[in-house]
Amino acid sequence: MMKHKTVFKNYAIMALLLGIGVEGYAQQQRDTVPDRPVTIDSIDIVRDYRPILADAVKIRRSPDMTNKRSYMPKLSYGNIPDKKLDINTGLKELNVQETPFSETLDLRSNYVKFGLGNFNTILGEGYFSYDEYEDMQVGGFVKHLSQKGSLEGQKFSRQEVGVFGKRILPLFTVNGLVGYNRYATNFYGVPLANDRMTSLNPSPEGQTFSDIYFTGELTSNYDPNDAEALSYSAKLDAYSFSDKFDAKETSVALSAYLNKRVNAFNVGANVSVDINSVDGTDNLANAGKTKNSLAILNPYIRFKGDNYAITLGANFIPEFGDSTSFNIFPAAEVDFALAPEYFHIFGGVNGGVKKASYRDFARQNPFLGPNLAIRNMVERLHVFGGIKGNAGATFGYKVKAIYRQLEGMPLFVNNMGTPFQFDMVYDGNGDEAVKHVGVEGELNIRLSELINLGGRLNIDQYTTAQQEEAWHTPKLRLAANARFNISEKLYIDAEALFHGVSYGKAFEYDPATGLIISDTYSRREVPSFFDLSAGAEYKATKQLGLFVKANNIFNTEYQTYLYYPKLGFNVLGGLNFSF
């Protein structure tokens, strides 16, 4: 058996060596024999390629899911040497210019203020706002101011409180305000009898006004990517205003605005409805209640280019309530820039109806008597034109001339029986209107970061219809203001006011009885006056400040309405704290 295995092994080794020799000889022959074309006796065997992948090598290790925060070293830069790099390559030292003082921007939105002064003046004020979010703001305010003059009953007291909110949504913005105002005073006027010694008002009676109001508005947001998007707004105004006696005004007004830009022009409309009623008036036929509501529809089309703007439209105004009427007025305005930004000419013509508001009248003159007449004013024609412009950010101006025809112009006149109270009279009717020619001028000058000046001038001439004068209406009014930024911590403000001569109705009274002698009146002059006021504020710290305010610096004895002198020189000073 072993012999056969040995013979087989020998034969196998011999065959292997023979094969290697034959293969080497064949390889040599292939290397020496040149290539020749394949003949028909050549056979190529091709089979499909079958890819075979090796088994994947799996990573048999799970990741570490533990949250391990890497160590953050505390860096210190206090050991960096302060070295100067000296390179003399012709560079010279810069001349550092001193930055002028300007008012610092204080981002604090909350503050409280308290002050005291002569004439028993007490001031307390606070404003609070939460505006940490860019799209929302809420807040409130409260204020108290009281003064007492040297005359009998010469007192003033005002309180204000309110809350407000604002919310910016993707498409529109909503804001609202709810508040309460109270104003108290006395009928302290000093009319005298014919002997110029006997007072017709020995015991001044008190008067108090209360005003509860609400304002809410919804306005579309501007889309910079769509200049032709529809813009709109809706607003609700409501208030209840009353005095110490029987007078009370209730008003609810809803207004809306729509505008659509189409290429080079805008199409839109203003719409409003004002429901108004006043109790305690002279309308005895309706138990002393007057309703003077109105609605306004103002469609328009506006063409606007680079250097011009033209607006064409109309005002449709129906009045309803105790009396009804329907009014149509033109509404057109043009504005051309002869030198853009520097010089514009503008003009227009329109008309309208202004609601007679007991609240507005009382704010102008708080010494109104009972049983007032309430009547809307119709502006039959209003033509205006002028120039305006500016020179950069340092100088701005506007001059406008106006001509108006008025029906039912409201005027204050002293009551015959109680001259320390005022009645309402209205000049101009359907047959004859009041003609008003006036000039208005505005000026704003910024001399530097330190000084800002501004002023307004009004010159008015009235051609009355039934009344002898435009009572208690001066023909010349001038108001100016200035602000001086002395330093980053000290600011000074100044205001000047000038009123020209006006006139009131005056009657003669019996010194013994205090009764009117005759209903024949005389024109009593209300002299012109100049009132200068100034104030200063010093910021001791970023949060604490000191302020002082001086009014009627020249201690001028003047009056806006007949028999009612203003306070003399008075000073108010105190502290304010912002947070």
Image (cartoon, grey):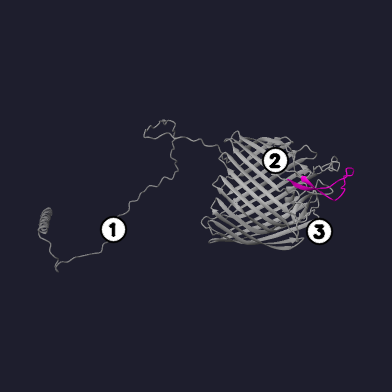
In-front residue for pair 280/67:
280
Horizontal side of residue 511 vs 364, given as left or right: right
Q: Which mark is residue 531?
A: 2
Quarter of the C terminus within the rendering:
top right
Pointer 1: residues within 10 angstroms few (<14), some, or many (20+)? few
Q: Earlier in the sequence, mark 1 or mark 2?
A: 1
Q: Position of residue 156 (x, y in %)?
A: 75, 41
Pointer 3: residues within 10 angstroms few (<14), some, or many (20+)? few
Q: Which mark is residue 52?
A: 1
In-front residue for pair 467/17:
467
Horizontal side of residue 486 vs 477, given as left or right: left
> What distance separates the C-alpha of mark 1 from that of mark 2?
105 Å
Disc 2 element: strand
Residue 351 in sight from this viewpoint? yes
Residue 272 in sight from this viewpoint? no
In-front residue for pair 567/474:
474
Magenta-drawn segment = 501-525
Instruction: Name the image quarter holding residue 301.
Output: bottom right
Horizontal side of residue 575 vs 224, given as left or right: right
Dot 1 amino acid type:
Ile
In-front residue for pair 150/213:
150
Dot 2 amino acid type:
Asp
Q: Earlier in the sequence, mark 3 or mark 1?
A: 1
- Residue with the mark numbered 3: 286
Q: Residue at x 51, y 35 (%)?
A: 98
> What distance separates the C-alpha of mark 2 from that of mark 3?
44 Å
**Between tags 1 and 2, which lies in front?**
2
> What distance separates the C-alpha of mark 3 from that of mark 1?
107 Å
Q: Position of residue 138 (x, y in %)?
A: 62, 47
